[in-house]
Image (spheres, rainbow, N blue to C red):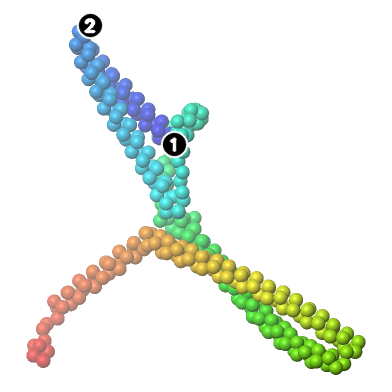
Amino acid sequence: MQFARYQRTQNMKAMQCAFQDVIDSRLLEATYTAEEVRDMLTTLSDVVRGDMETELISFAHINVLLIQQLCSQAEKWHLKLKVDLDKLQNLELLEKVKAWEKGEDQPFAARRPEKLEPLSNEGSQGPVQLLREQNDQLRQEVSSNQNTIHELQGQVHRLEHERNILQRKIVEIKVEMDQICKASISQKSELENHHIEEVESKLNALSSSLKETQEGRQEVQTQLQQTSEQLLQVQAQLQLAEQELERKFSQTAAYANMKKMLTTKNEQMKELRKRLQSYEPDDPVAGDD
């Protein structure tokens, strides 16, 4: 707002100077004809229109550069900017901006200009540091997911072992039940019937336990699959973040200086080799060989 107000003040001064130039250079007589007045107004109109057009174009280009900087930084961080053009003509908001401008009493020339922070900033709070923190966080998530996968795999193995044990017990009980059924054909005593009911009760209980174990195994396998998918997503994000960090580092001043030093050293080595070859005499014996 202060910069815009400063520019507007300069434009008004330029317009006043244009009118004052006409007064000082053309209004020197007491009377003028209509043609002379028309000529002076036409000349003044051309001057004012040219100045206004130049200033409006300059102001529009300044706004374009400002918005371009903001959009460029937002694009680097994958941000989505949304502009509501209707609010640009909202009278209530324009009045608030006008009141805000009136409240700004510090002149633009006395205020220290501020610049947008570059993306290649290597400070502790720069984008490179943020990328590093995101990479560390992604690595922690990967490690946590891997530990969870190991735990779930251990649970799956334990459930598999329990299921095998229950299946063996069911087979043994079925064999025992078949033997009792065969014996009950010849000996239908009350004691044997009671034993059959007890064996059937055990079989039902074991079947229920096996069913619960299978359901638990299926649930653990589902969790294992979901965790594996999350691990793949986090690893993909980590790879993208590391690529972004590497690209950001390649844009830093330290990387550019290192590359420039290596290029300079290579050129110096080539020059020293040429000088050494010029000082060494040719060996005729070696040439004959």
* 249 w.r.t. 15: above or below: below
* 162 w.r.t. 268: above or below: below
Q: Nearer the observer, disc 1 or disc 2?
A: 1
Q: Which residue lies at the image location 28% right of the left edge and 18% below the top edge? A: 20
* Closer to us: 73 or 206: 206
Secondary structure state at the residue bearing disc 2: loop
Q: Of the two numbered discs 1 and 2 on the same chain, state the one appearing first in sequence.
A: 2
Q: Position of residue 167 (x, y in %)?
A: 70, 84
Secondary structure state at the residue bearing disc 1: helix
Answer yes or no: is residue 56 visible: yes
Read off the residue under disc 1.
85
Quadrant housing residue 24: top left
Which label was assigned to residue 263?
none
Read off the residue under disc 2.
30
Q: Quadrant of the C terminus?
A: bottom left
Q: Which residue lies at the image location 34% right of the left edge and 61% below the top edge? A: 256
